[in-house]
Amino acid sequence: MASALLFTALGLVLTFTPRRDWPTSAIALLAGIGAAGVLPYPRNWLEGAFLGCWISVSGTGAMVHLGRGLAPLALVAMSLNAGFWGTAASAASGSKLAVLQALPCVLIFLPAAWLAAKFGPLPIKVVSSWVIVIAVLAATLQMLPVTPGYLPDHLE
Amino acid sequence: MYSRQPTSSIPSVLSRARIVAAAAMCTLLSNPAQAHMGTGLPGGFVSGFVHPFQGLDHLLAMISVGLWGAFLGRPLIYVLPVVFPAMMAAGAIMGMFSAPMPPVQLGIAISVLVLGGCIALALRAPVWMASLVVAMFALFHGYAHGKELPSAADPVSYSAGFVIATGLLHIAGIGVGFLNQHPMGVAAIRGIGVIIATLGCCFLWQAFGS
């Protein structure tokens, strides 16, 4: 979920970047995944990996609201970051390879670019705000030991 | 020599058929177990997604935000659907930490009444005022969600579900708001606003009653 949202956010950022920068971003993303894939992750690093991932989702999603697209170097940094934290979150939750299942989410830039060309950037910005909100809520949930809505029944 | 005796097997076949028929009948007549229904909370994406659709007060408020935004035009057509979820998240966080708030049901009822009233009166509020009104009401809606947020079953997917459903309701409101491009559209939208505001009055009455 965390990795999928991060890649979705990156896909939304790519919507507003020139097409010539898309391959560079893809290479940077794969490099980030590869680099994070060889690192060992201790089991107690789970919360840190998820928090980093949620912060990255918020940061990446916020970039969509910039008036103009990202500079090429910033896009590379953003893609590397997405690859790293996406893999870290997957690794922390059990399987590094699970990141590959989330990877297609980045392809959202294809329909999003079409949508932006047809209706303007507003729908993409609205969707990006949803992604940010989900990340903020998820990061906050992580800090709560038990959410107030939890009502254990007599079997627990 | 061993030979089969078909006459002796008929009763056993019949009794087997009776057992199967009885089992089938029991299966058909039995109800699902009702144990622990109503304890704990549902969770997951689908549960979060359907949540805003289950309460008419939430549903009308979300649609009203999109409708009012579409009525007010740019930039509020997209500012309001961005402000609402952002402040809803802030409200949800307050709810999770049980921060003190005025009665939430009252706030939600007033939100339906005020937003419906703004549409009914075709109120052309400035950007800051419309954003402030929507942000304030979003806090109440978010607080209610945050309080209800289950941790028993995948709260992250649950919150993703309700955020996306909320956004889709805004879009539905915007879609209805495009009626104002038609000659009778403005009157129709204001009529919808009147209905929403009237229902808001009912929610307010209920909130005072509870």
Image (cartoon, rainbow, N blue to C red):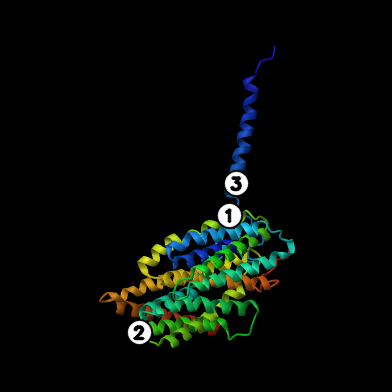
Decide which of B205, B20 is in the foreground and name it: B205
Amino acid type shown at disc 3: Thr
Q: Position of residue B120 (x, y in %)?
A: 36, 83
Distance between the alpha carbons at the discs numbered 1 and 2 = 50 Å
Same subunit, labels 3 and 2: the answer reads yes
* Tag 1–tag 3 contact (CB < 8 Å): no
Q: Provide the chain ID for the residue under circle 1.
A: A
Same subunit, labels 1 and 3: the answer reads no
Question: Is residue B38 depicted above or below B63 in this figure?
Answer: above
- Say few, some or many: other residues with alpha carbon within 10 Å of mark 1 (under 14 / 14 to 19 / 20 or more): some
Label 3 belongs to which residue? Answer: B27
Circle 3 or circle 2, nearest the eye: 2
Label 2 belongs to which residue? Answer: B122
Label 1 element class: helix
Amino acid type shown at disc 1: Leu
Label 1 belongs to which residue? Answer: A100
- Say few, some or many: other residues with alpha carbon within 10 Å of mark 3 (under 14 / 14 to 19 / 20 or more): few
Q: Position of residue B113 (x, y in %)?
A: 45, 83
Distance between the alpha carbons at the discs numbered 3 and 2 = 58 Å
Q: Position of residue A83 (x, y in %)?
A: 59, 61
